[in-house]
Amino acid sequence: MKHPVGLFSLIVTLGLTTACNPVDRSDEQPFAPTVETLGATIEGHRALLSARVTASPNSDLTACGFAYGNDTLRAKTTAEAPTADFTAATDSLGSGQYYAVAFAQNGVGTTYGDTILFTIP
């Protein structure tokens, strides 16, 4: 009796191909959000910071806001409601250069956008 080597090779190859290329199920899994820090608009001695959550797959946003400061000041401000586009104002700041970074949080974790610099005259 002949051994079906060709059939065996085909089954092994199909099995390896399926194991190495699993079905993409990323849309079924929750992930931490992704967020972009958009900019700062200066209003007197305060800055109005803006950002955008670009994705929060399968997990509702629980908080959005900004961390900001300079060499001696580190503060945090949160948006009124965690939404895709959000803004928040800083406290009154003295003259100088400051940094800000947006954050977004959902049930999976917290992520941060890029850091921006702004100047209070």
Image (spheres, rainbow, N blue to C red):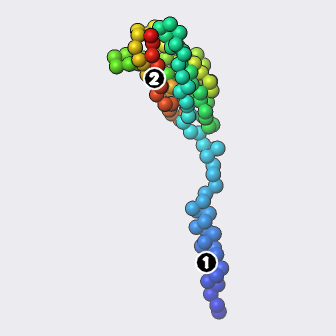
Q: Can residue 64 be seen in this view?
A: no
Asked whether residue 7 appears in the rendered view, the answer is yes
- At mark 2, the secondary structure is strand
Residue 18 location in percent, x, y? 62, 63
Query: Which residue is labeled 2 in the image?
Result: 117
Left or right of residue 120: residue 29: right
Q: Position of residue 46 (x, y in %)?
A: 49, 10
Tag 1: Cα neighbours inside 10 Å, few (<14), some, or many (≥20)? Answer: few
In the picture, which quadrant includes the C terminus?
top left
Considering every residue shown, the one lying at the far left of the view is 72
Q: Is there CB contact under 8 Å for labels 2 and 1?
A: no
Q: Which residue is drawn at 52% across and 13% down?
A: 42
57 versus 77 height, above or below: below
Q: What x and y, as percent, mark residue 47?
A: 51, 14
Provide residue 110's location: percent of width, then percent of height. 50, 31
Residue closer to the observer: 2 or 82: 82
Mark 1 sits on what residue?
Answer: 9
> Residue at position x 58%, y 62% from top?
19
The three-letter code of the residue at mark 2 reads Leu
**Quarter containing the N terminus:** bottom right
User: Viewed as shown, does residue 88 lie left or right of 119?
Assistant: right
Q: Which of marks 2 and 1 is nearer the N terminus?
A: 1
As drawn, 14 above or below 21: below
Q: On residue 74, which mark appears?
A: none
Left or right of 21, for residue 93: left
**Residue at screen point 60% across, 19% down:** 81
Q: Which amino acid does label 1 sit on?
A: Ser
- Badge 1 marks a residue whose secondary structure is helix
